[in-house]
Amino acid sequence: MWEKDMNIDQIQEIRVKTNVYFGVGAISKIEDIAKDLKSKGVDKVIVVSGKGAYKLTGAWDYVEKALNSNNIGYVNYAKVTPNPTTAAIDEAVAMAKDFGAKAVIAIGGGSPIDTGKSVAILMEYKDKTAAQLYEFEFTPEKAAPIVAINLTHGTGTEVNRFAVATNLEKNFKPAIAYDCIYPSYSIDDPSLMTKLSLNQTLYTSIDAVNHVVEAATSKVASPYAVTLAKETIRLVAEYLPKAAADLENPEYRYYLLYASLLGGVGFDNGLLHFTHALEHPLSAVKPELSHGLGLAMLLPAVIKAIYPAKAATLADILEPIAPGLKGTPDEAQKAAELVENWLAGVGVPQKLTDDGFSEADVDKLVNLSFTTPSLDGLLAIAPVEATKDVVKQIYQESLTPYNK
């Protein structure tokens, strides 16, 4: 059905760049990666991580052993928080410079890996700051080598060229995208994810769903992005409820992780638009807000806004979570309600008012959507024109449930 929405005269770029070791036990490949780094002259690295997950998961035991056995010195910046900041990036860069690090090993979910990517750029551009990087004052063409050891199944950052950071002073949460920050190697090992909490399991998986919904419906969507979207949503629909009921089951984590990987490749190709552009202001204003939860709050209203323009594609890819859609533009409200019902059914019924947002916040959020660096690029490729009225309506409709 989705074929109806494709423009076959549009030339598209299909990207698959990073070498990924995927599967239970993949963390053991860090030994081979360390050997390769050493053979290329890397004798010092900075390890970028959060405060504890890199150890609690067991990942650090493998990494430390591999570094020591290959005589690679290291320092560890272990202070990355959810929704990482430009200030933290600068702090990590200073540590890397002082130590003389030549590569970055990032261990964690999207926040540590995105931080690691940013650090890798600034290790090469020593006179620049993270604020300058995220306000696009220069265009990087090189970065130190990056190894990404992924600890969540959601962001897909381990397989793409994107990174995000928040400038707290300005409430800006821009995204960057440069070829130089594709990781040289990534490790996707589901056994490292069996300790994720229920909420982390839910929110990261919903992030993957949002990635592919946007990538499959943007103005630059390719058949490849749509194909990836269909499988990503099918896998999440099947395995998220199972994982939520049995958090330590590695098989369920395996398929959610594969869905996340597909989602990361999907939006590396089809890019993102409304949901991510509008979520970034939410978690910039409230850094404690989980990115995946913010996306979940917005997704139904975004579906409603874009459905008339991409009805065939959305009916097709959403079938596992919104069954029975025919792919006609008049189903927009129904599609939104079905997606909202699915979110509530897996345990994420929250809307913006549940997290402290109100009608009084909407104008500020709309303004940030249009003034935060890089978000204009996302809005420009939405399948319907991203006017301020459209954005405002999405925020307003996301305050409370449709079926309240």
Image (cartoon, helix red, strand yellow):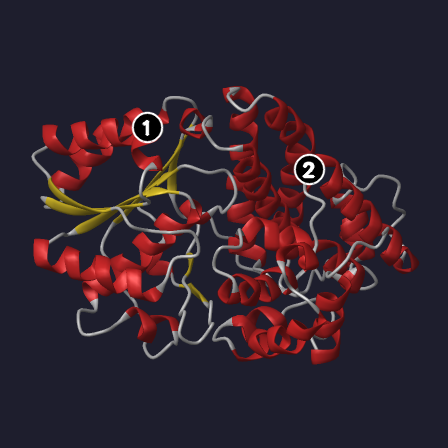
Q: Position of residue 298 (x, y in %)?
A: 68, 58
Q: Where is residue 341 in the image (x, y as percent from the top left)?
A: 80, 43
Report crowding for label 2: few under 14, some 14 to 19, many 20 or more residues within 10 A (C-alpha).
Answer: some
Q: Of the residues shown, which amino acid type is indicated by label 1?
A: Ile
Q: Is mark 2 on a helix, strand or loop?
A: loop
- The relative height of residue 362 versus residue 292 in the rendered view (above or below) is below
Of residues 142 and 323, the one nearer the viewer is 323
Horizontal relation, residue 228 to residue 400: left or right: left
Rendered location of residue 251, percent (x, y): 54, 20
Q: Who's the residue at 24% across and 51% down the image?
A: 145
* Residue 27, numbered label: 1
- Can you tell which of label 2 and label 1 is closer to the viewer? 2
The quadrant in which residue 282 appears is: bottom right
Which of these two is toward me, 292 or 358? 358
Give the residue at x 48% y 32%.
196
Q: Is residue 24 left or right of residue 45?
A: right
Q: Are marks 2 and 1 in contact (CB under 8 Å)?
A: no
How far, Cα to Cα, is label 2 from label 1? Answer: 30 Å
> Residue at the location (10% across, 39% down)?
72
Q: Is residue 143 visible?
A: no
Query: How busy is the neighbourhood of tag 1: few (under 14 within 10 Å), some, or many (20 plus)?
Result: many
Q: Which residue is drawn at 30% across and 53% down?
A: 116
Which amino acid is tagged 2?
Gly
Residue, disc 2: 347
Q: Is mark 1 on a helix, strand or loop?
A: helix
Estimate the x, y position of residue 288 in percent, counting from the top left: 49, 55
In the image shown, does 225 or 88 lie closer to the viewer? 88
